[in-house]
Image (cartoon, rainbow, N blue to C red):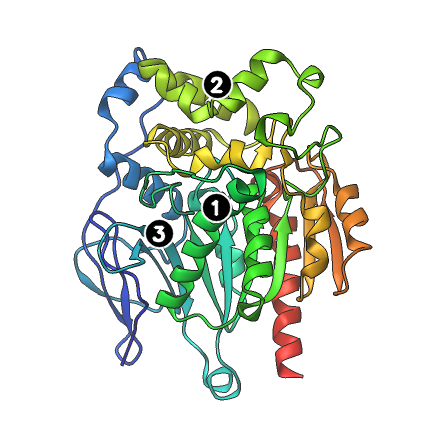
Amino acid sequence: MATTTNIPDSNLINTVTTDVTTTTTTTTQFTIPPAPSPNVRFASLRHWFMRSDRTFEASEARLLSRLRFFILGEKTVASELKTTARVGLVDLDGDGIRKINTLVIDQEFNESTAVTQEKKNLVMCHGFGGGLGFFYRNYHRLSLVEGWRIYSIDWLGMGRSTRNKFKIKGKTIEETVDEAENFFVDSLEKWRQVQKIEKMTLLGHSLGGYFAAVYALKYPQHVERLIMVSPVGIPPSPYEDLKNIKDSVNRRALPLWLIKLWDANITPQSFMRWTGPFGPSLVSQYTSRRFANLDEQDRIDLHDYLYHVSAAPGSGEYALSRILAPGAYARKPLMYRLEGIKMPTTFIYGEEDWMDYREAIKVSTRMNVPIKIIQIPHSGHHLYIDNPEEFDKAVINEMVEVSDIDIN
């Protein structure tokens, strides 16, 4: 009998099927080429000129290949692996139009576990401008928790998911925000149905944390625990005036140029794409500065991945100005909405995070469920990269607690 998951074949990356009885693994051959170095002559021009869907897929596979159970190779080999990882596009409607890129890390049950409980599901969701590859330093440790299946997705319109046209018809702030939220939240719900996941622990980072909370409010029956990692959108804007979209922020409080760019839906990714062959260089400057704690190969691979994520056609990124006002304040703040949450909730922040953990303390007084607020030392907004050991420990504690509650 073979273990299978509802993930269609990828064009480039392996889909792994492990036979439990014979412990053989069949995969499709692909050798991942090294990421282009940003330190050679004309590197930015070469990177820009050579980019394609295939190089995008390779940039993701390069990060995931750090998992020893992410297997590549066109041959059947003896394997003692108890865990397999596979990535591919999940077709939401069966017509190939909307697809969500999905990583699944699955493990065999031992005999005692198989008898006593069903597998638990952790679903991980990245933040604005990111993708599932950003969690590459976390998957291994999380996969060691027995009895759990790990899913990680690219939001619709982001990462390697399909970049469908993002068009909002709403006129009022209420209508506009609801429509923008539903683009992501309802596609996540459709993905859950396709994957046949009844219950999940839902984890979201930054804007992904905001979407995870909105999903939990709309579909509480499918979320047994919510983990919000440095979430955006909790505090109300100090300039709040909800007459209409353009009046939702005090125009004199921020630079006029910033407000105009925000209102015009000019995203950082838009600017990067406009720079053409200079785009890779801009991304390299950011990654080399922000992730200076990583070794050189990690920085190069992360740079290549982030460039491809940013260079892909704009789609879900255009939700930013619909959901957040200039200054990154939510147009419909979670401060007034999280009191409707019905499941235990954990907030995790970096010790040097630009998101303020004190907002979680404030909103917790409005919530009627068990709450935890955790700070990860020696880390900023990308705490899962800055201090993966402590971040993983915090998430694993939540996973174990969910399992213990289920058993008891």
Return the residue at label 1. 179
Q: Amino acid at mark 1?
A: Glu
Q: Residue at x 58, y 66 (%)?
A: 220
Res 145 label: none
Residue 359 vertical position relative to residue 343 in the rendered view, above or below? above
Camera-side residue of 316 and 204: 316
Mark 2 touches mark 3? (CB < 8 Å): no
Q: Quadrant of residue 248?
A: top right
- Can I make out residue 366 in this image? yes
Residue 6 vertical position relative to residue 203 in the rendered view, above or below? below
Image-based side of 122 in relation to 305, left or right: right
Return the residue at label 2. 285
Looking at the rendered image, the disc whose residue lies closer to the viewer, 2 or 3, is 3
- At numbered mark 1, what does the secondary structure look like: helix, strand or loop? helix
Q: In the picture, which quadrant includes the C terminus?
A: bottom right
Q: Residues within 10 Å of mark 3 (few under 14, many from 20)?
A: many
Q: Residue at x 38, y 38 (%)?
A: 166
Q: Residues within 10 Å of mark 2 (few under 14, many from 20)?
A: few
Q: Distance of mark 1 from mark 3, alpha carbons?
A: 19 Å
Image-based side of 222 in relation to 331, left or right: left
Q: Amino acid at mark 2?
A: Gln
Estimate the x, y position of residue 144 in percent, counting from the top left: 51, 64
Q: Amino acid at mark 3?
A: Ile
Q: Quadrant of residue 88?
A: bottom left
Q: Residue at x 30, y 71 (%)?
A: 4
Return the residue at label 3. 100
